[in-house]
Amino acid sequence: MSFATPAFEAACDAVRFKPLGPAVGNVTLGRGEFESRVVHVAIIERRVASGSIGVLEAGKLAALFRVVAIEQSPVLVCLDSAGARVSEGLAALGAFRRLCAEALRARLAGAPTAMVLGTHCFGGASFLSMLAPNRLLSSNTRIAMSGPTILAGAAGGGALDPAMRTVVDAVIGANARTGLPGFRAWMAEQSIEGWLRQSLAPARPPRDDPLHVHRTLGDRLPSERSGEGHGARVALQRECFDRLFPGGYSLVEQGGLVTGTGVRDGASRDVVGLVGKAPLGAVRAHRLAAIVWALRERGATALEVLLDCESHAATLDEERLLLSAYLADVALALMALRESGATIRLTVIGDTGGGVYLAAAAAAHHVAVAVGANVNVLPAAALASILGTRPEEAITVDAHRTAGVADEEIALGLLET
């Protein structure tokens, strides 16, 4: 079996890859062997729709990660994808929620994972890649939570403008990412076996521990941004919270981050949330992850997550920090809390979608969407830049449940009934 990406060819040759059945869309699954150990293999290539991951592909990958988590067995993932298949709408996002949940479990179970990246790694693919501890870059790899077209537009230019393309590539390309923790550059004349040996080793080094990664991400935040989100603390009183926590609540908002406690079903539980019009950037995501990691250390047993944040921040400044790493940190913190025995419920009380939704929803036991709130694959403007047209499909009352992005829709007074 041959591959368009030389790094894929080298990695698959090194593990003596053999496919198990035909490809499903852009995904081929198989097995190999490396230093007398069986290695699961998943290859995501750009056969159709820029290698995007739709419902069928996500289902295959989720099943693989489920096995890997149970066995704690090594897995090689070759990933060249523009992210979730947005043309499939909410169903693709729901499938990605399930895929990321299984990938999170595999990471926390200690399954050794080697992630080899191709040319494209955007959106949900970028998020998925950051759930692994180690990534190998080709010389032409570009990785970002937002694709080049969206980033160029946000910077006031066009994706076809050569000067703007150079600017964007300088931020999200392999040269910029190679110096980041967990990234390694690979050239065609180099051996890949040493990196595979390190990545697929049964004993994981301390630097791969998700809490250590969280602290490293904090160290990378620019000092001039350390004060973001530390403004006035505002007590929150809303009808939706009255209905959600009928036993009472004490919630405060500071810089778009909600913290506090609420009483539901006769029991007090911790509450965190994202609210406000500002897109989610690295600083606020890291603050949220820090709170969740602290709850895990404290032994919290129940967490309510509130979400009213439409999208992640699609800017070059955020991508200089590699925003998907910070969103993945939130998801890892939440899944680590869940794996410690805590119950996690997510309630969407406004518009959200994309990477923000995945970060909050992947680890949740239960996701509820308030009537009047919406989960979208991406904001309308971002969808238009990808599909060439704005979506006209209205989200019906049961669309969230049908697509698998929510388990329940609840009335919290956001709309008159």
Image (cartoon, rainbow, N blue to C red):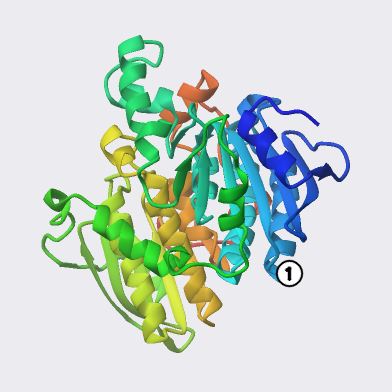
- Mark 1 secondary-structure assignment: helix
* CA neighbours of label 1 inside 10 A, class few (<14), some (14 to 19), many (20+): few
Question: In terms of depth relative to the viewer, which is nearer, 397 or 85?
Answer: 85
Q: Position of residue 344 (x, y in %)?
A: 50, 73
Extreme residue in the right direction: 21
Q: Quadrant of the N terminus?
A: top right
Q: Which residue is drawn at 27% across and 61% down?
A: 257
Q: Tell me which corner region of the image, top left, top right, bottom left or bottom right, holds residue 62.
A: bottom right
Disc 1 designates what residue?
Answer: 71
Q: Where is residue 309 in the image (x, y as percent from the top left)?
A: 36, 50
Residue type at mark 1: give it: Glu
Question: In terms of depth relative to the viewer, which is nearer, 366 or 155?
Answer: 155
Question: In terms of depth relative to the viewer, which is nearer, 368 or 388?
Answer: 388
Report whether residue 413 is seen: no
Question: In terms of depth relative to the viewer, which is nearer, 323 or 107?
Answer: 107
Q: Tell me which corner region of the image, top left, top right, bottom left or bottom right, holds residue 227.
A: bottom left
Q: Which residue is drawn at 78% across and 50% down?
A: 32
